[in-house]
Image (cartoon, grey):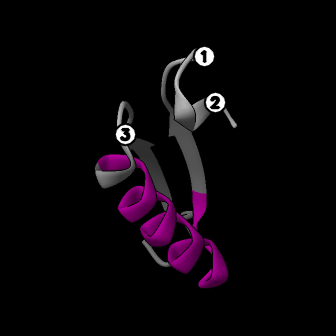
Amino acid sequence: MSGKPKRLMVMAGGTGGHVFPGLAVAHHLMAQGWQVRWLGTADRMEAD
């Protein structure tokens, strides 16, 4: 199992109370080598 890449999909949107904690977790895990994908809406704050 150590050969498999670590992957995570983060779903967060709508308000900073959801987006910013999700971004913090995503950045932390990416720094540890995780592959992170983000899922949100195209017309809200998470699109930036």
Nearest the camera: 42 or 25?
42
Image location (x, y in percent) of residue 45: 54, 34
Quick one: which residue is furthest to the top in this view?
43
Tell me the element at label 1: loop
Name the residue beneath numbered marker 3: 12
Residue numbers of the magenta segment: 18-35
Name the residue beneath numbered marker 1: 42
Nearest the camera: 34 or 42?
42
Question: In the image, what residue occupies the spot 52% across and 23% down?
Answer: 44
Question: In the image, what residue occupies the spot 31% across and 48% down?
Answer: 18
User: Which amino acid does the dot numbered 1 rest on?
Assistant: Ala
Name the residue beneath numbered marker 2: 47
Question: In the image, what residue occupies the spot 45% across and 44% down?
Answer: 9
Quarter of the figure with residue 14: top left
Image location (x, y in percent) of residue 48: 70, 37
The number of numbered discs placed on residues in the rendered structure image is 3
Answer whether labels 2 and 1 touch (C-beta < 8 Å): yes
Tell me the distance, in whole angstroms, between the alpha carbons under discs 2 and 3.
11 Å
Question: In the image, what residue occupies the spot 57% across and 54% down?
Answer: 36
Q: Eyeballing the image, is 43 above or below 20?
A: above
Q: Main secondary structure of the magenta part?
A: helix
Quick one: which residue is furthest to the left in this view?
17
Image location (x, y in percent) of residue 35: 62, 59
Image location (x, y in percent) of residue 1: 42, 71
Nearest the camera: 10 or 20?
20
Tell me the element at label 2: helix
User: Which amino acid does the dot numbered 2 rest on?
Assistant: Ala
Answer whether labels 3 and 1 touch (C-beta < 8 Å): no
Quarter of the figure with residue 13: top left
Q: Eyeballing the image, is 24 above or below 36?
A: below
User: Which amino acid does the dot numbered 3 rest on?
Assistant: Ala
Quick one: which residue is furthest to the right in this view?
48
